[in-house]
Image: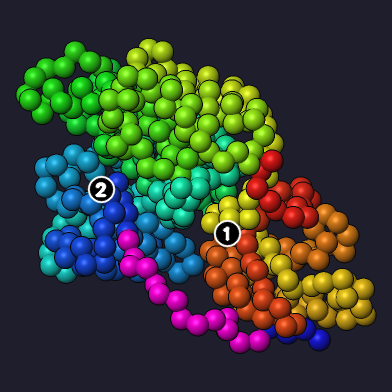
Amino acid sequence: MATYVGARPRGPRPRPRPRYHTGGGWYSEEERLSSNLPPLGVFQANGRLWRAQRCLGKGSSAAVYRVTSGAARAAVKQFVHDTKSDYGFLTESGVLEDLQGHRNIVTLYGRFSNVSYTNQRCNCILLELLDVSVSELLLHSINRGHSMWMIQHCARDVLNALAFIHREGYVHADLKPCNILWSAEDECFKLIDFGLSFQEGNQDVKYIQTDGYRSPEAELHNMLAQMGMESNTECTTAVDIWSLGIILLEMFSGIKLKETIKSPQWKANSSAIIDSIFASKDMVYSAIPVYHLRDVIKSMLHDDPAHRTTAEHALYNPFFSIPFAPHIEDLVMLPTPVLRLLNVIDDSHLQCEEYEDVVEDVREECQKFGPVMSLLVPKENPGKGQVFVEFRRAADCKVAQQMLTGRMFDGKFVVATFYPLCAYKRGYLYHTVVADT
């Protein structure tokens, strides 16, 4: 009978220096430890006792912690107590309260004040805990770019969020890769960090957007504000569309575009540069979807905000009607509640009398990581011989994926990826997962 044995039989690999991110940017462990923000520790919020597990990142005025209360997990954004930070706390919590209920916007659980053991009072917001950011995804696709499935998924989710935000009269004003995070539980991308957001026509923030994702009109507005001059340039919802266009172009190309956007060539003819990026990409995709993506990106990057597409209009682009399959790297990077195991069961297992015993072995092994809701091992294509395990929680599935990858089962190395829950529920099982064609 096949059984799992031992840990992955691989030599030690160098571990990259950990980096943490919030809206303020990326920070090393040393920078995090040198923060003057008080530690969160143990605190009460929403009628529960929470314990901070670790700092996920920090900016100049706030830090984000992963916190737990029993089986519940959440994130806390803790603001330093000063005039600037108090403004950010009130702005972000107020905007989130107005925008709650949308699938592609981070959930706000509540806001509260906390007093640390150093007697420092800090304002905090309790938020849904999310997973990998687009910024992290981009680090894994340098010079290669992402699959069309990934780009389409991210673009659709962010456009849906922006369409809702803009209908409610708000401008996000700081859209960038580290402010778009994947939700393993909901299997979608969500927007975070509304500290610079404002209601259209009522801009009370002088400096908006992050360098590299800043629209031309925001660039002019910020420059005049720094000089102490009044600006006649109104920053509208179009600034968010510009930022998303840059993000999607980076996801497609695998190239950071900050310097490109600042170049005279971009200012002279950005459309030609976009064409050259698409032309230089090794075309493993069919032409029509690529042209649709190019066109929707171009519609987001007009210098004149009046000519830019809107979020609602962009969603009607034919690019979003094309069905794509995820690449295997997508299924490794984006956690879900469903685990897919390869190299576990072959044709001999499917036909032998011990088939049920083998399946039960797999179930017992997976239950070590959390409650298993269902387990499927197709005997015929599609999905023949693959093992699909649905966990109650995506967090348990993430642990299982980390622990089972590289383990041995019946003399073979196990390959563990995540799998879209919606596809699993519909019985849509891929026989093989390849790059988009």
Is residue 15 shown in magenta? yes
Q: Picture coordinates of residue 405 (x, y %)?
A: 60, 72
Amino acid under disc 1: Val
Instruction: Identify the residue at image location x=55%, y=70%.
Output: 402
Left or right: where 404 falls relative to 17: right
Q: Which residues are magenta?
A: 5-19
The answer to which quarter of the image holds residue 354 is bottom right
Q: Picture coordinates of residue 157 (x, y %)?
A: 52, 37
Image disc number at residue 426: none
Main SS category, magenta section: loop
Q: Quadrant of the N terminus?
A: bottom right
Image height of 363 relative to 265, above or below: below
Q: Is residue 43 visible?
A: no
The answer to which quarter of the image holds residue 285 is top right
Q: Quadrant of the C terminus?
A: top right
Instruction: Identify the residue at image location x=38%, y=12%.
Output: 306
Residue carrying label 2: 24
Given residues 10 and 217, the one toward you in this image is 10
Q: Picture coordinates of residue 201 (x, y %)?
A: 28, 17
Image height of 207 relative to 316, above or below: below
- Per the image, label 2 sits on a secondary structure element best described as loop
Image disc number at residue 332: 1
